[in-house]
Amino acid sequence: MFHLTRKLVRLLFLFCLLAPSRAQTADLEAETQRFLTEAFTQPPPSSSLWLTAEHKPAVRALLGHDYPAARLRYWRSGRRTAWVLDEIGKEMPITVGVVVDDGRIERMRVLAYRESRGWEVQSPNFLRQFAGAGLSGEQQLDRAIDGISGATLSVRAMTRLAKLALWLHPQAMQKASPP
């Protein structure tokens, strides 16, 4: 009887640990759908871009490390693409939606922020700085992004994701046939 109770307590504990992650996944899916509806009104079906061996050095140069996923999901309509990307801020991932229109960032939105500090990167005033940004020949943003005191690592993560989305955009355009 004691072993059964102990197993039941362990199972209940495990369930309690997993329940928030399911709720967070549902929240992220809902945020992603809202983001896509704002970006496209009628969201197109998703496509996938595989990060091949030829892509990885460029991605590593942009991020300073390998991207953790081998396949990236994106949405495309005409010359616009939308990306949902993750990058570590200080310790936890930040999930960001980026819309690129003809090689320029149209909008960015934080879909999930999991850090205890630096939440200011979600502010529309901060995010507006990225609108219209493109990549220079040196694979840097063609404009300066103002930092936020106390959120330096989150700002850097957002900047890396902006550069990555801008770099991925022409890869998706080449991959796809004209609409």
Image (cartoon, grey):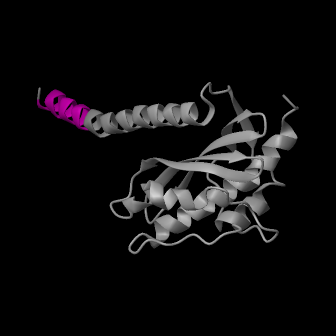
Residue 137, image x, y percentages: 82, 69
Q: Main secondary structure of the magenta part?
A: helix
Residue 66, image x, y percentages: 66, 59
Quarter occupied by residue 156: bottom right
Which residue sits at x=64%, y=43%?
83
**3 is within the stretch colored magenta:** yes
Q: Is residue 174 left or right of residue 168?
A: right
Which residue sits at x=64%, y=55%?
67
Quarter occupied by residue 162: bottom right
Q: In the rendered view, would you say 146 is above or below 106?
A: below
Q: In the rendered view, would you say 81 is above or below 104?
A: above
**30 is within the stretch colored magenta:** no
Q: In the rendered view, would you say 38 is above or below 118?
A: above
Q: Is residue 83 visible?
A: yes
Q: Give the range drawn in magenta.
A: 2-13
Q: In the rendered view, would you say 117 is above or below 14?
A: below
